[in-house]
């Protein structure tokens, strides 16, 4: 019995912070997590952009996923929101509720994942809170970013005639999730799709381009068509896209060719964490060229129309495609 | 069966936001929760203070507690952090993970609690996220406040000879929790203690006074002596307090007289959400007078000493009291 107790001996809240989280608080305003709040002194000429997103075991990731991957998913879904607003991230606050069975090794790997992403994206932990969870692991992150004053990109600026762009490829994460659930067979290319589900790539490289060129933008988290509908509602416009114009990865294309029914999952599966943006046709070419240069190519998939209900999706013959579900929800 | 389905019919994520949360987003920078992030344009001459705190079912409140009370506890523990830093709150972001059995009536009451506190403390919802919980209700809040540039009150400014103050009364919440757990008999005065556990009162009225007078401050969430130890560590000083000088409510005093053993629970039970501050003796009288005027009286309980280990607690005869646990942890 005693051996068991020793084996289970774990650090307390303060030790955990000391050992694994304090070193992540690199900004002076984080006070090395030794105070109750963070201080932020805004730079003149900047606006502050703030977002919060929660990831929950069994909802946004699987219980057994690698702790560093879970940490990075929690951070990246937030950075993706900031990227969609044209903002450059600089810091985040972390609330971490640990399940009863947590181990120190788990926390160590989790913090290592955070450290790697802090380096990757140039951000610092600014503050946080730890608690026992009621059930599984739950992580809430609030991320902060800067954008040039007045340049935050909203959902509400799309105008009739503007071109609709997406970054990267669409549907990979949704197909990856379906493979994990066993709903789609695990064939060649599955690794790429599984990775896209577990490791979102926030398109921070596009943020300054969006701030310069986009009339509206957001990151795609609830599904392409559903999120386009959000832009249409906020901008009081309509939209038309070509399903065949939506950029797909090779593995996604292969699955779609085999099972045309997965189109809905691709167009509305959610968790793409790609950018959806509208751009006036006058800056379209420049935007696309700069995006390619930044390492994140964008593809035009359609056009903003006068308001007339939800976005219209057409196939290559011009026929309107009806999609089953309009949006993905974590609910 | 059909009736049962109808009875269980609940709104989705977007409907929930529309019906109950959008109206809470009164700041223009919240965009009526219709965008992916909030915009904050800092006022020149202000610093921004940011904190995050999570409350979890079965850890920080009981599952059956009234939803409006849970909402208010989640908000107030954050506002309490800001108050301890001398900051005036203006907004917050909310991550809400709802358990499987949530009902619309529950969410309605929860949002009503938020609305009442927004009015009470002059704050606005700035953004948020909702998700399914893994287990019980989990709420993470990030609160934002303003303080005059350079005036944020840290833990690290206490100097030898400064007076140690606390606001209000100490130990009520910890005794309230013990009454709820059945560890202390429910007698006359229990209502006050139970209420102090469920409804923290962040001392926002003291914030401007702390910014003017305090050399260090924090809110007491982990227990008076443990939190004083945090100030001592950050300030590289020692401290001595008189247990008999610690202000108690009448119900707490009655319990202590009956059961002297609860002293440790009072001095280190946690969740007081009162202010602990150090003040140079030159501004002591002014600070105390202004605090009384603000409606939140403060009491001097001790003095900052040269560094010499953890805070010393003495009884009225001068004898040193050893306390069992040094700090409360939600872990």
Image (cartoon, coloured by chain):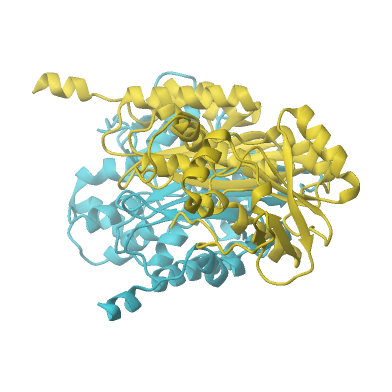
Chain colours: A cyan, B yellow
Q: Is residue B294 positioned above or below A92 on the image?
A: above
Q: Please tell me in which quadrant of the rendered image residue A281 appears.
A: top right
Residue A48 can be seen, yes or no: no
Q: Nearer the viewer, residue A137 or A312?
A: A137
Count of labels in the image: 0
Residue A163 position within the rendered picture, expressed as x and y whole percent measured from the top left: 53, 36
Q: Is residue B69 positioned above or below A97 on the image?
A: above
Image quarter (top left, top right, bottom left or bottom right) of the C terminus of chain B: bottom left
Q: Residue at x 45, y 49 (%)?
A: A273
Q: Please tell me in which quadrant of the rendered image residue B308 appears.
A: bottom right
Residue A141 position within the rendered picture, expressed as x and y whole percent measured from the top left: 51, 50
List the single residue furthest toward the right.
B282
Q: Is residue B241 positioned above or below B188 on the image?
A: below
Q: Is residue A135 left or right of residue B247?
A: left
Residue B141 position within the rendered picture, expressed as x and y whole percent measured from the top left: 53, 41
List the single residue furthest toward the front.
B317
List the single residue furthest toward the left.
B1
Residue B170 position within the rendered picture, expressed as x and y whole percent measured from the top left: 60, 43
Q: Please tell me in which quadrant of the rendered image residue A224 appears.
A: top left
Q: Is residue A15 positioned above or below B185 on the image?
A: below
């Amino acid at each position: 019995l005693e051996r068991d107790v020793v084996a289970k001996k774990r650090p307390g809240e303060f030790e955990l912070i000391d050992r694994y989280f304090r070193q992540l608080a690199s900004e002076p305003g984080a006070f090395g997590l030794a105070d109750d709040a963070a201080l932020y002194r805004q730079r003149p000429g900047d606006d502050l952009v703030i977002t919060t997103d929660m990831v929950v075991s069994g909802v946004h990731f699987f219980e057994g996923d690698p702790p560093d991957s879970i940490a990075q998913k929690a951070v990246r879904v937030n950075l993706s929101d900031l990227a969609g607003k044209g903002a450059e991230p600089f810091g985040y606050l972390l609330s971490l509720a640990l399940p009863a069975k947590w181990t120190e090794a788990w926390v160590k790997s989790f913090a290592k994942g955070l450290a790697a992403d802090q380096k990757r994206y140039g951000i610092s932990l600014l503050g946080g809170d730890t608690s026992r969870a009621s059930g599984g692991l739950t992580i809430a992150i609030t991320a902060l970013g800067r954008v040039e004053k007045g340049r935050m990109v909203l959902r509400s600026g799309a105008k009739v005639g503007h071109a609709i762009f997406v970054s990267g490829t669409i549907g990979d994460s949704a197909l990856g999730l379906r493979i994990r659930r066993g709903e789609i067979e695990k064939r060649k290319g599955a690794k790429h799709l599984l990775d896209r589900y577990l490791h979102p790539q926030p398109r921070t490289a596009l943020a300054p381009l969006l701030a310069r060129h986009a009339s509206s933008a957001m990151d795609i988290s609830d599904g392409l068509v559903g999120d386009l509908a959000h832009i249409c509602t906020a901008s009081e416009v309509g939209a038309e896209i070509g399903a065949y114009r939506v950029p797909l990865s090779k593995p996604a294309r292969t699955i779609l060719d085999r099972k045309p029914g997965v189109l809905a999952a691709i167009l509305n599966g959610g968790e793409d964490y790609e950018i959806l943006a509208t751009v006036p046709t006058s800056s379209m070419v420049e935007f696309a060229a700069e995006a390619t240069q930044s390492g994140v190519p964008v593809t035009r998939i359609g056009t903003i129309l006068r308001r007339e209900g939800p976005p219209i999706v057409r196939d290559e013959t011009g026929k309107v495609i009806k999609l089953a579900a309009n949006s993905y929800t974590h609910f």
